[in-house]
Image (spheres, grey):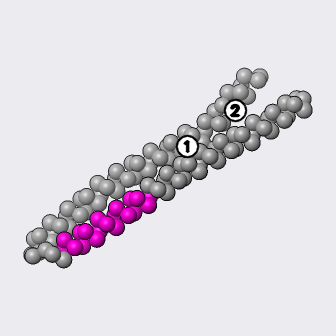
Amino acid sequence: MTHEDMQKLGKNGVEMALTTFGAWTKAAQAIAVEVVDYSKKSAESSAATWEKLMGAKNLEKAMEVQADYFKSSYEEFVAEATKLGELYVDLAKEAYKPFEGAITKASSMK
């Protein structure tokens, strides 16, 4: 391997690391925003449910409010978990792309 080949290899490694870091940073920001939004919505939903419970005229109405809250909370959690799972999959795909190109290049050099 020549000196130029070593320089190219080093340059490609740095570019790959920067690209991967950029993908991780972008995905981490998207995940953080999603978690903050979900947390905010969850807190707002809890507060609204608490107000409804305090305004319930009887036990039956209070149980209905609570059941509705549990159902909607569960559905929102499942939707959020699915969305976060997709964000993590996207992160893995984006982080792998630079390595995929490097593997292809390495295979073609043989």
In magenta, the rendered stretch is 35-53
Displayed quadrant of residue 72:
bottom left
Q: Position of residue 38 (x, y in %)?
A: 38, 59
Q: Main secondary structure of the magenta part?
A: helix
Q: Position of residue 33 (x, y in %)?
A: 47, 56
Amino acid under label 1? Ala
Q: Secondary structure at mark 1?
A: helix
Identify the mark nearer the N-term, 2 or 1: 1
The residue nearer to you, when weighing 14 against 75, is 14
Furthest residue toward right: 3
Name the residue beneath numbered marker 1.
Answer: 92
Does the magenta segment cover residue 46?
yes
Q: Position of residue 47 (x, y in %)?
A: 28, 71
Q: Position of residue 102 (x, y in %)?
A: 69, 32
Q: Is 94 rendered above or below residue 25?
A: above
Quarter that holds the N terminus: top right
Mark-to-mark CA distance, 2 and 1: 16 Å
Name the residue beneath numbered marker 2.
Answer: 102
Residue 30 as seen in the image, left or right of residue 78: right
